[in-house]
Amino acid sequence: MKILRLIIILFVLISCNKTETEDIEIDVYIPNNSGNSTTDITIIKDEFQNKKIVIAGNANYQFIVSFERELDGTLLEFSQSEIGIPIIMTDNEGNEWDIFGFAILGPRKGQRLKPTQSLIGYWFSFATFYPGIEIFPDTDRRGEFDGEKIEGSGNWLVPIDEIRSGGVGKDGIPALTNPKYNRAYSVEYLSTSDLVVGVSEGENQIAYPHDVLDWHEIINDGLGEQEYSIIYCPLTGTATAWNRNLNGKLTTFGVSGLLFNTNIVPFDRETDSAWSQLFDSSIFDELKGTKPDNLMVVETTWETWKIMFPQSNVVNFDTGYNRKYGDYPYGEYKTQDYLIFPVKYDDNRLNPKERVHAVVINGKARVYRFSNF
Amino acid sequence: MNFKGKYITIILLLFIISKTEAQTCCSGGTPLTGNLGIQGLEAKSWYFQLGYDYNFLDDLYSGTEKLDDNSRERLTQTIFLQTIYAFSEKFSANVLFSYVDQKRTIFSSIGETNITSANGLGDVVVLAQYTLFSNLKRSLTIAAGPKLPVGKFDAVDPVFGLVLSTDLQPGSGSVDGIFGGSFSESHLFDVTGLTLTSSAGYRLTSAAKRFEGDNNYRFGNEAMVSVGFLKNFLINKTGVTPSLFFRYRQTSFDKIEGFEVAGTGGKWIYLNSGLSVEPTNNWSVIVSGELPVYRNLQGTQLTTSFRINIGLAIKLYRN
């Protein structure tokens, strides 16, 4: 059985990561999962805003992902896959699903589960953007801000008095465009516990290290047919990938230097409109009210990513900017309770800097804690 | 106190100040401590100095390493007016007013230049000065007083009307305590006109309220010590005094809600060279330039590349 598993893993890894243009000898990292509890994937079935969803995660690997359970009108039942990462779930039809929601094996091979609108970040950020947010499994206690809403003012879609100047100015934090990569198996500049943000398109994946995102916050890039911008806010710890094809025009995003509720406010270079990552909308100027087209991202540790996608590309430190990429630029911000800028709703049900996974449906949010996994 | 005792006192004072956990006027902040100009005067006399300070920052440093980066620069220009009045040989008052213009320029990766600027009245420093001794050979004056937050602290950007960040504001918004002193010894090594000049200053900061009082921001404490020499010459009945001194400056982390703000604070040593021209005993023109010779910054910071200071000083004596 163990040998069979290894053969399947080897087959899946090679088939998932083969490239069209390069013939490279690689070291394939095969996870040895047998008898190791740290590789257990916890599967949670839940229903939120009348959507049946499945949430899968592993606290040691620092990832949580979530998907809608219904596919082509069929409600699937999920359990932990026996194969090992990047395959995380199996279903009642015999399909094996990977961390990005692709069916790798089984009758639905090639199909994809619909990812929920979700992201990982610090608790305080979700608490202030979604007042009254629910905390799984205690979803009946919604805190003191239940019922509060974010209302716009002036020409903004959000309260202008909660927009702050972050101190660096427009483009003061330089966004990257078309970054350079190394292959994951050859990367030596990351530590095992470093976090990366990953995207997947077809058989290819790209990882964006927090070490780079901490200094640039936005990376305009593309993979396959997708042209997108990784938007990362070090102050809320949240990462998203937005399609940068806006109304038929390909653009790039930059860092405006503004913050809304201490969360990044990107701007698009096509119309100069301001956007809010966590409000998930353009909030000022020509495109005000436009919702971004979100691509699924997976956040996890570098060690985990390298095991899952050894042939993937990883953004390297040759960015054209001279920065201390190994150094976190915000001191003790990650681990201490303070915020640099105030937020509207200060919900103290959890530690403000606890990293959680938030699922957003119909403008409401529910968070899942790593301790649940 | 005998001569030896006075020297020991001065050295101890400088040592204590230089060892104290120090400041931050933030990289682009108002250079008040550097412009204090503590000095004693003859009784019932006035001293005025109208000055201009040009502080240009485009060096990006991390620790002691200079990073290769040309994406941004800062310029702080300050016009200041210093007034000293001596009530007696011992007691005098020193008041420093300032008007500050801050400009931040960012050169984006796509060739755009984004400029943000703010200007307005800076904070005011009021010092009570006490001259411990002053004679033809030596003088020592100490001073203490508050820095009052009368400076503009709510400057907004012209595009969105949003309050600019703390480091771009002309004022600091906080009441700070300023302590300092200056010592000089003339005829050093029995050379006529050669003077040892030194000064020390310390700024003990307090927190300022930002964002409608929702947030406490405290600039780090700042310490400064300078030691150097000047030499008087008389050329065609005009006094000419070149000077050369080292200035050490140390600042501690800024704090938000009591937590240290990364990318603030550090240690600097500057080499300052100046020239004072005194056509008469009553007035003089002072020009000086300053270059950093050592920088050790906490985190990554944009820091001073050079600084120029020009002043016109007038003394009005009782008789």
Image: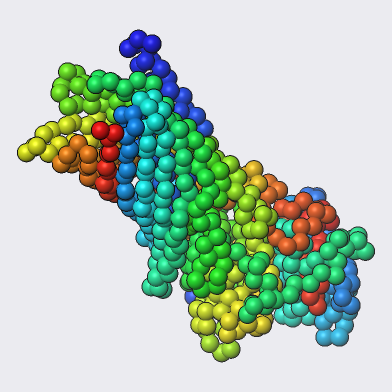
Quadrant of the snapshot with the C terminus of chain A = bottom right
Would residue A349 be found to the left or right of residue A104 on screen?
right
Q: Position of residue A119 (x, y in %)?
A: 71, 66
A105, A72: nearer the viewer: A72
Outermost residue on the left side: it is B236
Would residue B43 be found to the left or right of residue A87 on screen?
left
Q: Is residue A241 visible?
A: yes
Residue at 22 percent of width and 42 percent of height: B284
State whether residue A279 is above or below residue B252. below
B278, B294: nearer the viewer: B278
What is the quadrant of residue A83 in the picture? Answer: bottom right
Quadrant of the snapshot with the N terminus of chain A = bottom right
What is the quadrant of residue B46 in the picture? Answer: top left
Residue at 87 percent of width and 72 percent of height: A48
Residue at 41 percent of width and 44 percent of height: B96
Q: Is residue B267 visible?
A: no
Q: Position of residue B156 (x, y in %)?
A: 53, 65
Outermost residue on the bottom side: it is A248
Would residue A104 be found to the left or right of residue A319 on screen?
right
State whether residue A155 is above or below residue A173. below
State whether residue A340 is above or below residue B23. below
A291, A41: nearer the viewer: A291
Q: Position of residue B32 (x, y in %)?
A: 42, 44
Q: Position of residue A104 (x, y in %)?
A: 73, 73
Residue at 66 percent of width and 82 percent of height: A289
A349, B40: nearer the viewer: B40
